[in-house]
Image (tube, rainbow, N blue to C red):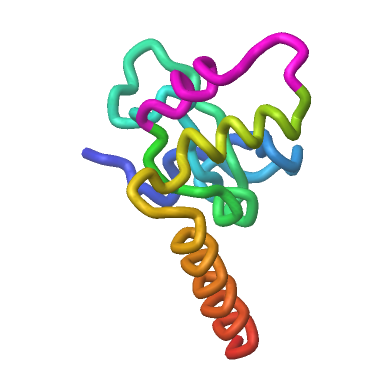
Amino acid sequence: MWRSRKNRDRRTVTCIACGDSLLREDAREYDKEGDRWDRRDKEFEYLCTECDDNLCHQPRDGLEALICSIEADGLSREEFLGRYADAVGPDDRDDADATESRRRSDRDRERSDRDR
């Protein structure tokens, strides 16, 4: 007979972001390879709910390759970020359109923060 899910895993794990200890059942699984469903021969890391909520959960396909392609020895943080912004920035709009879009986005974000 199957055991109840509630009592399945009472071990303690450590959040890789903040270092807090918590029950495994209360933690979020983190898989560096991005495929938590393929569980064979993997060791998972864990995040507490608060740290997991603070992460961006957008797809990262191609991100590592992009970063490696613009990375160089001796590159300052500002130079790296400039290259990254150029690589992921809008291709088909001119700078004025991109600036206006960012302004609208900032305005929308400010309005939603006030409404909370």
Estimate the x, y position of residue 27 in percent, counting from the top left.
Answer: 55, 45
Q: In which quadrant will I find the N terminus? A: top left
Estimate the x, y position of residue 104 in percent, counting from the top left.
Answer: 51, 74
Q: Residue at x 51, y 70 (%)?
A: 105
Estimate the x, y position of residue 10 in percent, counting from the top left.
Answer: 55, 40
Q: Residue at x 56, y 56 (%)?
A: 53
Estimate the x, y position of residue 109 in percent, counting from the top left.
Answer: 56, 75
Q: Is residue 12 above or below residue 103?
A: above
Residue 47 is one of the magenta-drawn residues: no
Q: Residue at x 39, y 29 (%)?
A: 34
Q: Residue at x 45, y 29 (%)?
A: 63
Side of 67 where 39 appears, left or right: left
Count how many numbered circles sit on residues in the image.
Answer: 0
Foreground pick, 98 / 35? 98
Foreground pick, 69 / 17? 69
Residue 62 is one of the magenta-drawn residues: yes
Foreground pick, 40 / 93? 93
Side of 86 where 41 appears, left or right: left
Q: In the image, which residues are magenta? A: 61-75
Residue lying at the far bottom of the rendered structure: 115
Q: Is residue 108 above or below residue 49?
A: below
Quarter of the view holding residue 70:
top right
Foreground pick, 111 / 11? 111
Q: In which quadrant will I find the C terminus? A: bottom right
